[in-house]
Amino acid sequence: MSVAGVVVTHGLDPQLDRCLELLRPQVDELVVVANPPAPEPGTRLIVNERALGFAANANKGIAATTAPFVVVANPDTQPNPDAVTTLVDFMSERPRCGIAGPLMLNRDGMWQPSRRLFPTVSGTLVRRTPLRLLLKPQTRQVEHYQLEERPNRPARADWLLGAFLLLRREMLDELGGFDPGYRLYGEDIDLCYRAARAGWESWYVPQAVVRHDHAAITDHRFFTRRTLWHWRGIGRFVRKHPERLRAL
């Protein structure tokens, strides 16, 4: 089975070359979609005339490739040499698996939560406001979409962190890809949610390992530009899927 790789970068990124070096041997097609200023990655490059959000950029890269499976990756990810093959083999055995994500590790090798439940009203308020500082650790764990669960075998997921995902093109064609109305944050939740409603499965596959230099700015600071983008994404998700307001 052939697989395409799409790397989205929002300007110059010092980690891009290493990401491409590790990803290139694992895919049959590789394209970088970049907001200006554009890098010189030594591979196929699509440069926007103006800056676009992650979802719109990912859709551009997906449209520029043809393989039945597509890896969409951030430039700050470093897949193990067998990561893509492991995900493709897993998905190939499950015709309704439309989304598969790896075990993610921080740069220092510590586990990084990437398998999550769909957001709830209470969970969002706890995770994105100072309320999280007031709750006991056990309560935070539940309200944080069960971020502390660490299965060591493949497990179903509501949604998976969008930094590195294997996507089935058949599913993307059916759903129309990512929703470009999300600038940053929420596009991965939305895709997984729409996929689930259409009968597609999302799976966490810990045998595939990817390091991710995740800054997690919105987890440590409450008032930043990225926080505003995050709340904008939450607002769009709720407007599109108002039934989630009943999920307390």
Image: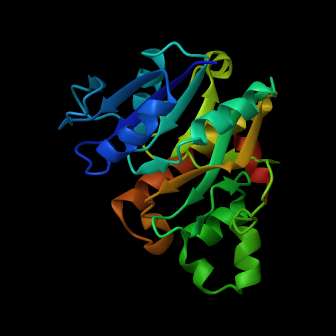
In this rendering, would 135 be left or right of 226?
right
Residue 98 visible (yes or no): no
Q: Residue at the spot x=43%, y=59% of the render?
A: 213
Q: Indicate the quadrant where residue 35 lies.
A: top left
Q: Position of residue 219 (x, y in %)?
A: 50, 69
Q: Position of residue 144 (x, y in %)?
A: 68, 67
In terms of depth relative to the viewer, which is nearer, 59 or 40? 40
In this rendering, would 37 be left or right of 199?
left
Residue 87 visible (yes or no): yes
In this rendering, would 51 be left or right of 81?
left
Q: Position of residue 164 (x, y in %)?
A: 53, 43
Q: Residue furthest top?
A: 66
Say above or below: 185 vs 35. below
Say above or below: 175 vs 84. above
In this rendering, would 92 be left or right of 239?
right
Q: Residue at the spot x=54%, y=32% of the render?
A: 71
Q: Position of residue 207 (x, y in %)?
A: 70, 49
Say above or below: 82 vs 56. below
Q: Residue at the spot x=77%, y=71% of the render?
A: 142
In terms of depth relative to the viewer, which is nearer, 230 or 22? 22
Q: How many marks?
A: 0
Q: Indicate the quadrant where residue 103 lies.
A: bottom right
Q: How is the image coloured?
A: rainbow
In terms of depth relative to the viewer, which is nearer, 17 or 173? 17
- For the C terminus, the quadrant is bottom right
